[in-house]
Image: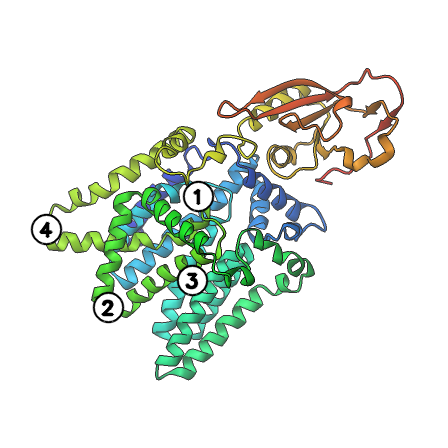
């Protein structure tokens, strides 16, 4: 009872957080990359020999493992994956509260937490089975322990910092930016501080902990073989020294637009004012936070080939601390009613977030009117998951609990990965890759495909994996926001002529 009374403010904030994160968690259909990560996560944790499967696409597996573990306990794979992000978002909230309380004050901590809970871009990514929310968590806790290393110079804080940075890199390569920032700041203290030796030892401990956390990753040859493929998204060194100024200018403009519209204008402006106030005040711990924020976004702007919501969101959570600080400075200066002052920046993001939760598709359509950096890929085209659940339900009704086989083409993403996700744990319906590439020349003079159970084929648009002549269309589900559709086909059991039995195909879940 003592604990509840002592922490009642944060417990109320936590309840508010989970309300805005869990309600309608699966209302927005499964996104293309969510489908892929959930597929990889299930394979890595349930299929022997697949533990590092995602490395074939240069994606570190740590978060995939958690996705896979959660799918063990929940029947809906999308709910399981998105719940993981909700939990990481909560850890981000805890970190924001602790940083604000330790290096500012309790009121600023409460307001910063409220801002984090209601800002639409955080609400969105805390409800997606993607890596960005988890990387945001890593940023917040990296800053927290970096500040503790600088203040207390204790090795336990350096170990914690190194482990968190290591986990971040085990999740996504972009978290390496936080290691770079931590190193630069600690090197600055080594050069400027009288306790050079102590800071140097702490830096060594940070690096040692980072390397130990990633030991299993670094000894995996597949990691090094595919690492260079990240140049799909970031500039290589040779590209950087050519000074791609046009791309940098575009990234800077894009980041400003995303921050302004998706943090919401008032909170973005308050954040900028708060940063200015802290720079003027010149408090050392708070200045480190500013250096971290500005340098992290600078590095992100310089390295990526094109910015987006998704690439920026992991670097934005700390902005709410400065928005909160700014609001408290304004309150102390003009003495306006504090509840009215808080309501002004809270109202718009809260209403937008409620709109997002209740009707995510209309929210995306609405925001697309104000910014080109919108999320239309969630509702139109192949990347959208619209039609996936309808396809799953149709096949379940058709098969009536009996055995059946679903074929999908050798594609990654929607609908193929999503179909795998939703049927992995189904005892009667198995999913396999069914594609001309798997048969090679063996189908040259074959008229029929045979299987002991009914065989369905799920297609993206009209793509039938080169097996068109063996399939007849049953139905399709058209995306109302584009010309894209998901097709359902069936192998003709009444086919006559030379045939081949596909019963021996290896299923992805086997």
- Marks 1 and 4 sit apart, C-alpha to C-alpha, by 36 Å
Q: Position of residue 211 (x, y in %)?
A: 56, 68
Q: How is the image coloured?
A: rainbow
Residue at 50% of width from left, 22% of height from top?
480
| Dot placed on the residue nearer the N-terminal end, 1 or 4 | 1
- Mark 3–mark 2 CB contact (< 8 Å): no
| Dot placed on the residue nearer the N-terminal end, 3 or 2 | 3
Q: Position of residue 202 (x, y in %)?
A: 45, 76
What quarter of the picture does the C terminus occupy? Answer: top right
Q: Position of residue 181 (x, y in %)?
A: 43, 66
Residue at the disc numbered 1: 125
Q: Position of residue 412 (x, y in %)?
A: 64, 39
Residue at the disc numbered 4: 335
Q: Nearer the viewer, residue 108 or 468?
A: 468
| Dot placed on the residue nearer the N-terminal end, 1 or 2 | 1
Look at the picture and state if 192 lies above or below 503: below
Which disc, if any, is residue 142? 3
- Mark 4–mark 3 CB contact (< 8 Å): no
| Dot placed on the residue nearer the N-terminal end, 1 or 3 | 1
Look at the picture and state if 124 lies above or below 252: above
| Dot placed on the residue nearer the N-terminal end, 4 or 2 | 2
């Amino acid at each position: 009872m003592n604990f509840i009374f002592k922490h009642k403010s944060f417990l109320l904030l936590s309840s508010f957080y989970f309300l805005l994160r869990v309600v309608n968690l699966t209302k927005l259909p499964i996104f293309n990359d969510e489908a892929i990560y959930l597929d990889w996560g299930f394979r890595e944790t349930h299929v022997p020999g697949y533990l590092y499967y995602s490395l074939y696409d240069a994606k570190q597996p740590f978060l995939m493992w958690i996705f896979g573990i959660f799918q063990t306990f929940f029947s809906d794979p999308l709910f399981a994956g998105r719940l993981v992000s909700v939990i990481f978002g909560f850890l981000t909230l805890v970190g924001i509260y602790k940083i604000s309380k330790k290096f500012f004050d309790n009121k600023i901590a409460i307001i910063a937490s409220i801002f984090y809970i209601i800002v639409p871009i955080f609400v969105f990514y805390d409800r997606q089975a993607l890596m960005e929310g988890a990387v945001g968590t890593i940023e917040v806790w990296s800053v927290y322990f970096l500040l503790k290393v600088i203040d207390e110079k204790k090795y336990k804080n350096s170990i914690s910092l190194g482990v968190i940075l290591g986990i971040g890199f085990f999740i996504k390569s972009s978290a390496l930016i936080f290691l770079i920032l931590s190193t630069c700041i600690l090197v600055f203290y080594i050069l400027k501080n009288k306790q050079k030796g102590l800071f140097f030892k702490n830096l060594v401990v940070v690096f040692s902990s980072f390397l130990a956390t990633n030991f299993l990753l670094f000894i995996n040859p597949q990691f090094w073989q595919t690492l260079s493929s990240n140049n799909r998204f970031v500039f290589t060194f040779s590209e950087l020294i050519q000074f791609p100024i046009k791309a940098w200018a575009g990234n800077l403009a894009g980041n400003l637009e995303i921050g302004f519209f998706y943090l919401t204008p008032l909170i973005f402006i308050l954040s900028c004012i708060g940063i200015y106030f802290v720079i003027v005040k010149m408090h050392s711990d708070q200045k480190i936070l500013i250096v971290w924020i500005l340098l992290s976004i600078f590095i992100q702007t310089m390295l990526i080939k094109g910015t987006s919501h998704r690439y920026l969101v992991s670097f934005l959570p700390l902005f709410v601390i400065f928005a909160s600080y700014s609001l408290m400075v304004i309150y102390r200066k003009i003495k306006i009613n504090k509840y009215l002052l808080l309501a002004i920046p809270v109202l718009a993001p809260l209403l937008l977030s409620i709109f997002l939760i209740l009707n995510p598709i209309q929210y995306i359509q609405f925001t697309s009117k104000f910014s080109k950096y919108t999320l239309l890929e969630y509702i139109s085209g192949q990347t959208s998951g619209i039609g996936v659940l309808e396809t799953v339900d149709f096949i379940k009704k058709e098969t009536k609990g009996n055995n059946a086989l679903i074929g999908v083409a050798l594609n990654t993403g929607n609908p193929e990965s999503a179909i795998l996700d939703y049927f992995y744990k189904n005892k009667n319906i198995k999913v396999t890759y069914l594609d001309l590439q798997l048969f090679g020349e063996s189908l040259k003079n074959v008229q029929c495909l045979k299987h002991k159970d009914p065989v369905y084929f799920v297609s993206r648009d009209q793509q039938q994996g080169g097996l068109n002549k063996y399939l007849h269309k049953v139905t399709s589900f058209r995306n109302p926001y584009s010309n894209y559709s998901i097709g359902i086909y069936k192998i003709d059991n009444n086919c006559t002529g030379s045939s081949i039995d596909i019963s021996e195909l290896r299923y992805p879940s086997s």
